[in-house]
Image (cartoon, rainbow, N blue to C red):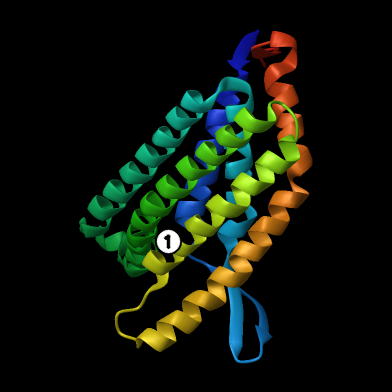
Amino acid sequence: MFKIRKFDVIVALYIFGIMVVELMGAKVIPIADIGGLHLSTSVAIFVLPLLFTMTDAVTEVHGRERTRGLIRLGLLIVLMQVITAALFTVLPSDERFAWGDSAYDAIFGSSIRFGLASIAAFALAEFLDVAIFAKLRQRLGKRGLWLRNNVSNFLSQFIDVLVWTTIAFYSFGDSLGSNTAFILGIIIPYWAVRCAMSLAETPIVYLAVRWLRGNKVETIAAKAA
């Protein structure tokens, strides 16, 4: 029989979500055209709200400092990914792999910029999320978990979207007007959808909190194969 601590499961899911965002979030999908504004969003939209939900659940059960430690770990992972991508993309390829070298460099080279954008945006947004959630908990106590979760998510995710999108997608070869239109076209639906997903995922934070508390059971046990 082997045992896995519950908090270790949270850490694993948190790091998994971060890596999915970093390596796959560069893809932008269309949403709609409203007037002259083309609305689109990153595929990271399907993962990021869950990361904020996890930190809220950890803050609720384990406190603010434990959550800060989890965020710092996430930022360290992103930094390591950026450094690794920068190193691996400059290494020469074997002749047998030359056919895929340009695609490899294009994909993982772009992840360097997205990683740097994530470090700035994620640090600001996640620590803001924890601060707002903790402040609301001081005022409301254990009441209104749904309110604390969503208010902190709405505000922090706006900062995350604003900072990340600007750093990740600003094109120095285009005009300020063109950049502004494109970035706003991502920020508006991206933030709106993330807020909607935060509301939809409210039951998850309740389940996560209940699971983490779990009558003080700290481990998941399973029979070894």
Nearer to the camera, 155 or 57: 155
Q: Tell me the element at label 1.
A: helix
Query: Residue at 33% of width from left, 57% of height from top?
Result: 112
Residue 93 visible here:
no
Classify 45 as above or below 80: below
Give coordinates of residue 51: x percent, y percent.
58, 43
Residue 80 position, x and y percent, is: 32, 42
Q: Is residue 207 visible?
A: yes
What kind of residue is marked 1? Answer: Val
Q: Residue at x 52, y 67 (%)?
A: 27
Give the residue displayed 64% in from the left and 12% down from the top.
Answer: 218
**In the image, residue 24 above or below residue 169:** above
Location of residue 130 with respect to 27 vertically, above or below: above
- Please tell me in which quadrant of the rendered image residue 10 appears: top right
Q: Using the image as rendered, state which of residue 220 and residue 166 is in the foreground.
A: 166
Across and down, in percent, residue 128 comes to 48, 44
Q: Which is more toward the observer, 222 or 190?
A: 190
Q: Which residue is mark 1?
A: 163
Q: Which part of the image, by quadrant, shows the C terminus? A: top right
Residue extending furthest toward the front: 139
Judge by depth and name the residue closer to the eye, 117 or 113: 117
Q: Tell me: 207 left or right of 132.
A: right
Q: Position of residue 164 (x, y in %)?
A: 44, 61
Q: Is residue 1 above or below residue 117?
A: above
Q: Answer few, some or many: residues within 10 Å of disc 1's Cα (few below 14, many 20 plus, some between 14 and 19).
A: some
Q: Quadrant of the N terminus?
A: top right
Residue at 30% across / 65% down in the picture?
98
